[in-house]
Image (cartoon, helix red, strand yellow):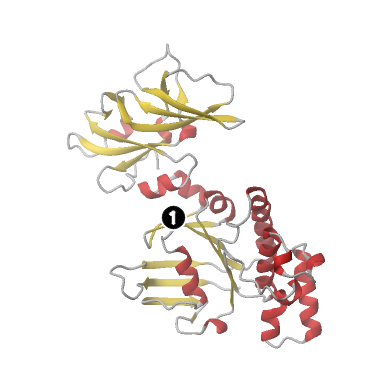
């Protein structure tokens, strides 16, 4: 196991006019499970390939513990990488695939056989040792790919979207097995995904990437509850956080023809400039239908656009009254009847406020 330090990494591909990665700086503790998450093309897989030694950085340094490995060949870094496409040898049996790396390192045959059998049993694939990859299901192939990494007893595991080719049920099962496996082995692990569920359930820490830059690092709960900017706020969550264009003026947030009062504790911290544009964020689970005969001063009136039944709940898509371009989602119980026009409200402690120009979170006491 090893601590991984990325020190101001930069990567620019030849012929490109911009960096693929810019100033990537993070330290992954020994034995931690960190998840790199972001949209396709944000640089997640490039970071893994740099750590593995499959690519060279344009700038910056890579350390395993106190050893700088930036110029060290991949075969000497003692890291194991699992690829999205499994990268198994189709002409070899499962046993031969599991033991290939150990064989290339000169491990004695008896010891190699014992190691392969132990790893295969831990992944429940010991009954498949004589089969070849084309005879296996996608889930079985994925276990073989993981097993090959485990058999090497590498100091760092690098997993590049290893579950993306599996169906939904098998992905859920394998995700749970991965977490249990890490708890047992304790190997430092970096996991790349664009799947929010995988990111939230697997990682000790999330690293949210956007266009080659780190936007936020934190525990899954920290990143979900306190997103530092609009990109992070809208990336995590299904449905995503509702973001409404608003203007702060005279103690109220004005959203087109509607307005709601700004919490008093915020008013002292917001800019005193009149008509200051902000982005008001509210997660779907924090919105509720309001009583028609209740206090309407803190409500937003909306028109139902679509109701999507999901079994245990419904997702309601609605448009702000008088502002059809401003859309929002809310979650309600499966037995709730949603009228065509209704009011929604949310406690101010669940509001998120972002600067209307920069998109950065406004660190106000009511939501921070």
Q: Secondary structure at mark 1?
A: loop
In this orientation, which residue lies closer to the viewer: 294 or 245? 245
142 lies above or below 51 = above
Residue at x 47%, y 72% (from the top left corner) = 5
Q: Residue furthest left?
A: 274
152 lies above or below 340 = below
Position of residue 71 in the picture relative to residue 98 (left or right): left
188 lies above or below 69 = above
Position of residue 277 in the picture relative to residue 54 (left or right): left
Residue at x 59%, y 79% (from the top left corner) = 78
Q: Residue furthest top?
A: 293
Could you tell me which quadrant the C terminus lies in? top left
Residue 46 % position (x, y): 45, 68
193 lies above or below 94 = above
Mark 1 Cα shell of 10 Å, populated few (<14), some (14-19), many (≥20):
some
Residue 93 % position (x, y): 75, 74
Position of residue 164 in the picture relative to residue 56 (left or right): right
Could you tell me which quadrant the N terminus lies in? bottom right
Residue 298 % position (x, y): 36, 23
Residue 243 % position (x, y): 36, 38
Residue at x 50%, y 41% (from the top left corner) = 238
Residue, disc 1: 39
Answer with the quarter of the image where residue 190 lies: bottom right
């Amino acid at each position: 196991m090893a601590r991984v330090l990325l020190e101001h990494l930069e990567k620019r591909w030849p012929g490109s006019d911009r960096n693929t990665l810019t100033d990537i700086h993070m330290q992954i503790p020994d034995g931690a499970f960190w998840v790199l998450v972001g949209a396709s093309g944000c640089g997640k897989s490039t970071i893994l390939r740099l750590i593995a030694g499959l690519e060279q950085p344009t700038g910056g340094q890579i350390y395993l513990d106190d050893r700088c490995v930036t110029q060290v060949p991949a075969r000497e870094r003692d890291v194991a990488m699992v690829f999205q496409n499994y990268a198994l040898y189709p002409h070899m049996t499962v046993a031969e695939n599991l033991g290939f790396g150990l064989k290339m390192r000169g491990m004695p045959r008896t010891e190699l056989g014992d190691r392969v059998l132990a790893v295969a049993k831990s992944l429940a694939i010991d009954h498949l040792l004589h089969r070849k990859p084309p005879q296996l299901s996608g889930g079985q192939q994925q276990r073989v790919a993981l097993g090959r990494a485990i058999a090497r007893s590498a100091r760092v595991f690098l997993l590049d979207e290893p579950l993306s080719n599996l169906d939904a049920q098998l992905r859920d099962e394998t995700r749970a097995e991965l977490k249990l496996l890490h708890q047992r082995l304790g190997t430092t692990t970096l996991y790349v995904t664009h799947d929010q569920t995988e990111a939230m359930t697997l990682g000790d820490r999330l690293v949210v990437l956007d266009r080659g830059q780190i936007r936020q690092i934190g525990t899954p709960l920290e990143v979900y509850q306190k997103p530092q900017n609009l990109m992070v706020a809208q990336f995590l969550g299904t449905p995503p956080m509702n973001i409404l264009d608003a203007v702060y003026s005279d103690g109220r947030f004005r959203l087109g023809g509607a307005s709601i009062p700004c919490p008093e504790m915020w008013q002292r911290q917001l800019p005193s400039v009149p008509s200051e544009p902000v982005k008001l964020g509210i997660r779907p689970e924090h919105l509720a239908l309001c009583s028609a005969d209740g206090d309407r001063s803190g409500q937003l009136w909306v028109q139902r656009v679509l109701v999507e039944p999901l079994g245990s709940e419904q997702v309601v898509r609605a448009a702000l009254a008088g502002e059809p371009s401003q859309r929002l989602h809310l979650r309600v119980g499966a037995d709730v009847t949603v009228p065509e026009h209704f009011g929604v409200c949310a406690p101010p402690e669940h509001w998120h406020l972002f600067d209307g120009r920069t998109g950065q979170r406004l660190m106000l006491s009511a939501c921070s």
